Amino acid sequence: MSCMKEFTKGLIKENPSLVMLLGMCPTLAVTTMAANGLGMGLATTFVLVCSNLVISLLRKVIPDTVRLPCYIVMIAGFVTFVSIMLNAFLPELAEALGVFLSLITVNCIILGRAEMFASKNKVLPSVLDGLGMGLGFTLSLIIVGSLRELLGTGRIFGFDIAPDFIEPMTVFILPAGGFFTLGCVIAIVGAVTRKKPKDIGCESCPSRAVCKELAGKENV
């Protein structure tokens, strides 16, 4: 159950982009098309899983004084591998992602999970954490990319969607449209996942027993 929790938390509850607001640069930059968002998300997921795996394995070997440089070197190695593979087999996607593909190395999502989770936990939970966070990041990129592509060009993944009913609005594939779309998606996710506020007062306070005890001592 604990392992499943580590996997599912990154999908919605702790979604890197839509809840924790991490990785905003690639989220805004590459989501002009849904396919670009999918490609960036899967590349980031691969690096997340591999880096979490290696860092968890070496967590007791890497000295604390040089842990961040070590993490960056490991992550950069996996990013280089992904870049080489994309340039070899999917050159159009690699060109569309551009510099943001290389910048996965310093993506705060990957460094954050390495520092906060993989370096403190065993291999299986670390791998599941990376997989969940990566898929959550991919999901957010696909959602934002699909909305921008649909509203901006009338297509999703290159396929025409209801061309007679949707008048393309170019602004949605521009930076301003990216900010607007991402803001709306974050607001919707926040409204859906927001917990109801607890009642205000002593009865709902978890420390009420301590307060009563202190009050009793003062009266004595």
Image (cartoon, rainbow, N blue to C red):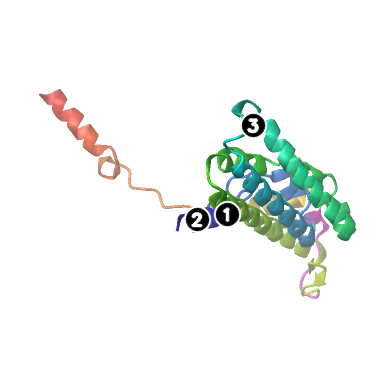
The N terminus, quarter of image: bottom left
The residue lying at 41 percent from left, 52 percent from top is: 196
Identity of the amino acid at label 3?
Arg
Q: Position of residue 195 (x, y in %)?
A: 44, 52
Q: Is residue 124 left or right of residue 142?
A: left
Q: Which residue is mark 2?
A: 3
Asked whether residue 59 is drawn in magenta, I would say no
- In primary-sequence order, the first of circles 2 and 3 is 2
User: For mark 2, does the 10 Å Cα neighbourhood hold few (<14), some (14 to 19), or many (20 or more) residues?
Assistant: few
- Residue 167 seen anywhere in this rendered image of the structure: no
Task: Confirm whether residue 149 shows in the render.
Answer: yes
Foreground residue, 117 or 97? 117
Residue extending furthest toward the left: 220
At 62% from the left and 55% from the top, the residue drawn is 131
Quadrant for residue 136, please give it: bottom right
Q: Residues within 10 Å of mark 3 (few under 14, many from 20)?
A: some
Kind of element beneath mark 1: helix
Identify the residue at horizontal 23%, vertical 34% (top origin): 210
Q: Nearer the viewer, residue 201 or 55?
A: 55
The numbered dot on residue 189 is none
Q: Which residues are magenta?
A: 164-173
Name the residue nearer the viewer: 64 or 107: 64
Residue type highlighted by circle 1? Leu
Where is 173 relative to 200, above or below?
A: below
The answer to whether 26 appears left or right of 94 in the picture is left
Decide: few, some or many residues near mark 1? Use Cα within 10 Å; few <14, some 14-19, many ≥20: many
Q: Amino acid at mark 2?
A: Cys
Q: Which residue is mark 1?
A: 128
Q: Which residue is tagged 3?
A: 67
Determine contact: label 2, label 1, CB under 8 Å.
Answer: yes
Q: CA distance from mark 2 to mark 1?
A: 7 Å
| Residue lying furthest front | 61
